[in-house]
Image (spheres, rainbow, N blue to C red):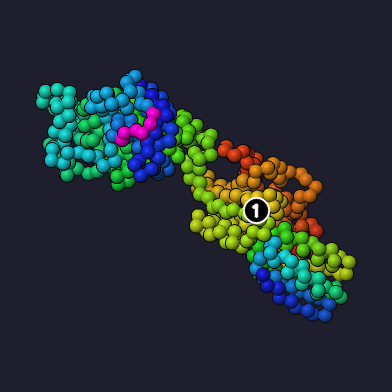
Amino acid sequence: MEIEKALNGTELTLKIIGRLDTVTAPELEACLKESLDSIANLVMDFAALDYISSAGLRVILQAQKTMNKQGDMLIKNVNETINEVFEMTGFVDILNIE
Amino acid sequence: MIQVTHLQKQYSNGLQVLRDVNTTIKRGEVISIIGPSGTGKSTFLRCLNMLETPTGGQILVNGEDITSPKTDITKIRQKMGMVFQSFNLFEHLSIIDNLCLAPIRLLGKSKEEAKKRGLELLAMVGLVEKADAMPSQLSGGQKQRVAIARCLAMDPEIILFDEPTSALDPTMVSEVLGVIKTLAQQGMTMIIVTHEMRFARDVSTRIFYMDQGVIYEDGTPEQIFGNPLQERTRVFINRIRDYRYTIHSAQYDLYELQGGLIGFCQKYFLSEKKQFNVQLLVEEVLKVVPLDKGDVELALRYSEKGEKVSLELTMPQGVEQVLENDENIDDLAMMIIQGLCQNIEYQHTEDTGQLRICLTLKDKPLKDKK
């Protein structure tokens, strides 16, 4: 997995490339931990995300909780397969998916 | 008619082909023997007329023990015809002479008598006009039909067929199977080793599924093909392919495992969606089952017949309950597992009694683009 970061004032865009699974989720978790201070808008771009498991979902859920306290979070460019995982787990109701 | 008890065959190199075969065959039965290659099907057939000498057990034919050295095996063989894969016609004799030789020499029939019966039988297999031809002038299918007629010329009580169509071009298979079907309708007792599943299903009164040197399952065609009771039979009948992996600890190599799963899915042309779901199911299941109690055996199975994908996990001994409601269980993983699967079953292995979890993927969890 690769994470491309783009900071524009208080808006942070993270483009996740590859797989978000048990092995790579801690990497995203660490990235979020060090990047979210003073961020008002977090955008996660999933255009290049191929795979996600519950380990990745858990990190996203944590980010959503953090952003609920300090601003907004948006997930964009979710492909059909990954959206089905969001539907299966009820994440479609919790997350702001564009 | 035939009673087989504890039949064994071990070759001099130590290879044990038949371990313990037990069965009773009644007059009028049409039995197809199916099973993977190398499981003793042909050896069993050849033992029944002593073309192979058993190394253990007993075969009674009409009450007579044919494994006994005192038995006149030639006499027994006269009542027990055999049709081979490779026809085994006498190449230097005409077709009609192939049919007349044994009845004249062994049954003491006159030339005229043998020829009359031979022509009747050739008519029955549709080859009367080839009576004076030489075997080399016939196609494979025609040669096999002659071989069946030659067998019938001895008025056998039972015919053993050893893969009668496996040496034939696909175009010739049906003509031979058609003749065997006619014999079945006439009430001939037959034992047929075959790989032609549809034929076995249509023509047989009983099926033996042989595996590991035994008759692993014995039942009606409806049972064996429709609802096999034993796991190995199911795997064989449903043409199940599998990918196996052993998890030794919680620190297992996820990417090696996922790589293997993807390779397997691609080999059998599973859609990208199914590949995704297989990976997801495996990863989530391995989050909720205990991986610190011993090796967990994982098998991904794909049934080509029903296009079903299932995951089977055999847990270490002592592990009894998993995937059940448990306050420590990973809810998110369970939600995904339940979303992906149409069915989760628990069984115990036949030999060690270990817990086995079988998860069948939904055909289309949501939308499937192939």
Residue extending furthest bottom?
Answer: A9
Q: Position of residue B71 (x, y in %)?
A: 27, 23
Is-magenta flag for residue B53? Answer: yes
Chain under numbered label 1? B
Q: Position of residue B210 (x, y in %)?
A: 43, 37
Q: Residue at x 22, y 44 (%)?
A: B139
Over which residues does the magenta segment extend?
B52-57
Q: Secondary structure at mark 1?
A: helix
- Of the 4 image quadrants, the one containing the N terminus of chain B is top left
Instruction: Please say whether residue A5 is visible from this viewpoint.
Output: yes
Q: Can you say whether B321 is above or below B287 in the image?
A: above
Q: Position of residue B270 (x, y in %)?
A: 54, 55
Residue extending furthest top?
Answer: B63
Would residue B245 appear left or right of B40 to someone viewing this image?
Answer: right
Instruction: Please say whether residue B29 is visible from this viewpoint.
Output: no
Kindly indicate the quadrant of the structure image that contains residue B128. top left
Q: Residue at x 24, y 31 (%)?
A: B151
Q: Can you say whether B174 is above or below B113 in the image?
A: below
Give the main secondary structure of the magenta stretch. Answer: loop
Q: Can you say whether B322 is above or below B96 in the image?
A: below
Pointer 1 local density, CA inside 10 Å: few below 14, some 14–19, many at least 20: many
Q: How many marks?
A: 1
Q: Position of residue B91 (x, y in %)?
A: 16, 41
* Residue where numbered disc 1 is placed: B281
Would residue B216 appear left or right of B310 to someone viewing this image?
Answer: left
Q: Residue at x 84, y 67 (%)?
A: A67
Residue extending furthest right?
Answer: A69
Would residue B67 appear left or right of A96 to someone viewing this image?
Answer: left
